[in-house]
Image: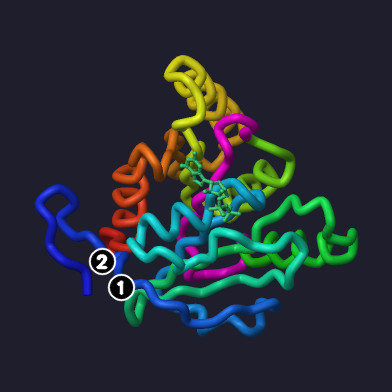
Amino acid sequence: MPVNNSEDVISVDYRRASFLLGVAELSQLPADDGIEVAFAGRSNAGKSSALNRLTEQKSLARTSKTPGRTQQINVFSLDDDRRLMDLPGYGFAKVSKKVKKHWDQVLSEYLQTRKSLKALVVLMDIRHSGKEMDWAMIKWALHANLSVLVLLSKSDKVKQGERSKTVRDVKQRLKEMNTMAAHLEVTSFSVLKNDGVRVLEKFLNAHYNPPHE
Ligand code: GDP
């Protein structure tokens, strides 16, 4: 159940997240109702660390994964109506072309057809932000009129000047891509310095509690 919070009116208790299931095919996903928000990113971008920080669970999403191991969409339940979706990390050098193509198709279809999916959170390492697949994911999401939040992760690894410049550059690139006038946000993010965590929570709260439903 959402709890009252003076700042957000309603905020979801992310600590209640629990693992529901992992799927390799979209047909195995839970019924397409309620509200989903998905997390995506290249492997090693910091997605598991962000999910663990959000849910205050040390090993909800495993932070050290073997490249090339079976990839799946991990579904976490927040309550009966709300789910967090941990999409498989992309960009493993060792993954075969066939497996890569399979996941490109699954992710593209998921982002563009899943009705309960309202928003996408993309983790990009602030030191090498915005690789090809990141922009492809964002493009598919915008095409489906989803909201997008870009977390420029590990911001503690760069100086303030570089941090601000990368945030500005990514915002500019998104502005150029955004033809649907969807809800788009960019922030620097660090689990070590607690940078951007509040922005992430507010973004999620807004999408898990839509004003007209
Ligand atoms: P994933 O593959 O996207 O799930 O990435 P992980 O969450 O496993 O993180 C990859 C590596 O980056 C791990 O060694 C983390 O400890 C490290 N990492 C994640 N977030 C941060 C951060 O905010 N700051 C720093 N300095 N390192 C981080």
- The quadrant in which the C terminus is found is bottom left
Q: Which residues are magenta?
A: 111-129
The spot of residue 160 in percent (x, y) is: 43, 19
Q: Residue at x 36, y 39 (%)?
A: 196
Magenta-colored stretch includes residue 208: no
Q: Quadrant of the N terminus?
A: bottom left
| Contact, mark 1 vs mark 2 (Cβ under 8 Å) | yes
Coordinates of residue 203 in the picture (x, y in percent): 35, 49
Question: Cα distance, mark 1 to mark 2?
Answer: 6 Å
Q: Quadrant of residue 129?
A: top right
Q: Nearer the viewer, residue 106 or 71?
A: 71
Name the residue beneath numbered marker 2: 13
Identity, as a three-letter code, of the amino acid under mark 2? Asp
* Residue at 45%, 74% in the rendered image: 76
Q: Residue most toward the top?
A: 161
Q: Which residue is mark 1?
A: 16
